[in-house]
Image (cartoon, rainbow, N blue to C red):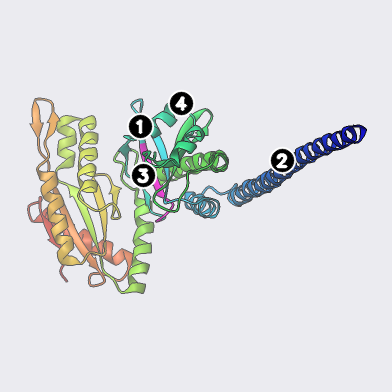
Amino acid sequence: MVLLQIMSLILACLIILILVVERAKKKFFQLLDALKFLKERNRKLRRDVEDIFGIYEGIKNVATTLKFDEILQIMSQLVHKYFEFSFATLYLFSEEDAKTFITLRYDFVTNLLSREKTEIVDSNIKDVIAHRREIISPEEKEIHDYFEEGVEKPPIFMIVPLIVEGKVIGVIEMRREGEPFLPFSADDLHKLSNLCAQTSVLLRRARLYAEVERLAIVDGLTGLYVHRYFQEKLTQEMKRAKVYDEKFSLLMADIDYFKRYNDQFGHLAGDELLRRVSMALKEGVRETDIVSRYGGEEFAIILLHRGKEEAEEIAEGLRKRVESMRLEVEGGNTGVTISMGLATFPEDGLSESELIKHADEALYRAKEGGRNRVVVYRR
């Protein structure tokens, strides 16, 4: 009987020992898992800190520059180094009549830059502007659903604002599409927010500097380039055309009877006439062509990569465009015409002064020939 009790006690002790060992074993593996998690988390935090420091170091390289292109180049390098994406775009905004427009679009995939002004139609971008906060999709609470079978997957993107003095001046949008992409993480969002925070002031400063430069080369009344800038671009284009054996043409244009118009309708009407003609000339050529106010009511237009025949067609189109304009004046409306002279490099001149002289001679012949016409320089 005593032996049975002793054996029962020993068995009970063994069971307790087994339970204690199992519990300790379970606790050990829990601690081991926790240690692995902490190591992984520590490794990830170290990598994130290194990434953020790398972004900081990259931005520091352009911290003193005022050149927009250099800032965009560094941003593109950092975006490609620290993020995985299908599409990534920088949008910069401006306000006009209390309405926000996209005035610059930079594609980080193609490195293409567009300055076309467009309205903001994306509701997510509007939301970022309105609330001055980033958006990520899917959100962290939606991640589990993202991996469920048969559940419609939300789009993968994040949009982060660039904020200066409490105002959203732009956003960076990143998207992932197709396999093998997974949703953006909170760490991805943090890194992009860090990049935007560090570059927003640089971008704003570069835009302001570019605007100051633009005002220095743009005529305040007409919005066309000033005479000095025209001379610089003519010199540059002539050097380039000589190196690459290319043609370009120069148009000199003059508003017919401008002094009579100014005397009859007043200086304000004369200013409006200059603005309207300038706009017509600018809209009638490519964005890459150089349209400038040469002086008074005279204009100079550099048509890049255009031979004589093609340039003459463009000049005739400009003449007709101006001729079709109607201007509101006291007592009704009136029309206006222009005369134009055309000279082409290299056949009409191998120097800036020679080309200008011959285009001007052609303009004089257009005036002498009855005005409202295009005359091509002939030797």
Identify which amino acid the numbered label 3 is placed on: Val
Return the residue nearer the eye: 292 or 206: 206
Q: Secondary structure at mark 1?
A: helix
- Provide the major secondary structure of the magenta segment: strand
Please name which of the two marks, 2 or 1, marks the residue nearer to the observer. Answer: 2
Residue 30, disc: 2
The residue drawn where x is 31% and y is 34% is: 121
Counting residues from the start of the chain, the first of labels 4 and 2 encountered is 2
- Above or below, 66 against 313 in this view is above
Residue ID for mark 3: 218
Could you say where residue 255 lies in the image, as x and y percent from the top left? 17, 45
Q: CA distance from mark 3 to mark 1?
A: 36 Å
Q: Quadrant of the N terminus?
A: top right
Please state the extent of the stretch shown in magenta in the rendering.
Answer: 102-110
Q: CA distance from mark 3 to mark 4?
A: 36 Å
How far apart, in angstroms, are the residues tagged by discs 3 and 2? 71 Å
- Tag 3 near tag 1, CB within 8 Å: no
What residue type is disc 4 on?
Answer: His
Q: Are marks 3 and 2 in contact (CB under 8 Å)?
A: no
For disc 1, the marked residue is 123
- At label 4, counting other C-alpha atoms closer than 10 Å, the crowd grade (few under 14, some 14-19, many 20 or more) is few
Q: Which residue is mark 4?
A: 131
Alpha-carbon span between mark 2 and mark 1: 46 Å
Q: Earlier in the sequence, mark 3 or mark 1?
A: 1
The first of marks 2 and 1 along the sequence is 2
340 shown above or below 283: below
Q: Secondary structure at mark 3?
A: loop
